[in-house]
Image: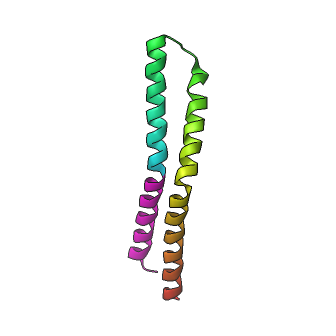
Amino acid sequence: MTDQAVLDTLREAFTIALKLAAPLLIVSLSVGLLISIFQAATQIQEQTLTFVPKLIIIGLTLILLAPWMMTTIKDFVTSHFHNILNFM
């Protein structure tokens, strides 16, 4: 493989990693913000209050997005396996 092919593969891998992580990070950030606003409004300062809702919502998000995530990863891996076979 050439240097440019390796750099292209790394760039695509980082792009896919960001694309896969973004929905989970956005959901986690949104839930955390809503719970922080709730805590500020009710003056409840329990640190563990954010953990359980985030865990549940992220778990549900993973269940809903798992087929799309697996398809994205599968397409990336199979395309690069074909590229490796073409170089040999």
Q: Position of residue 65 (x, y in %)?
A: 52, 53
Image label count: 0
The colour scheme used to paint the residues is: rainbow
Residue at left offset 42%, top offset 65%:
12
**Vertical side of 70 occupied by 41: above or below:** above
Residue at left offset 46%, top offset 63%:
13
Residue at left offset 42%, top offset 79%:
2
**Vertical side of 77 occupied by 17: above or below:** above
Q: Nearer the viewer, residue 42 or 14?
A: 42
Q: What kind of secondary structure does the magenta stretch mostly adopt?
A: helix
Quadrant assignment, res 47: top right
Is residue 14 left or right of 46 when viewed as pictured?
left
Q: Is residue 4 magenta?
A: yes
Is residue 54 left or right of 10 when viewed as pictured?
right
Residue at left offset 43%, top offset 41%:
26
Q: Is residue 18 magenta?
A: yes
Is residue 30 left or right of 84 when viewed as pictured?
left
Q: Position of residue 85 (x, y in %)?
A: 53, 85
Range of residues picked out in magenta: 1-20
**Vertical side of 68 occupied by 5: above or below:** below
Q: Position of residue 19 (x, y in %)?
A: 43, 55
Q: Position of residue 5 (x, y in %)?
A: 41, 76
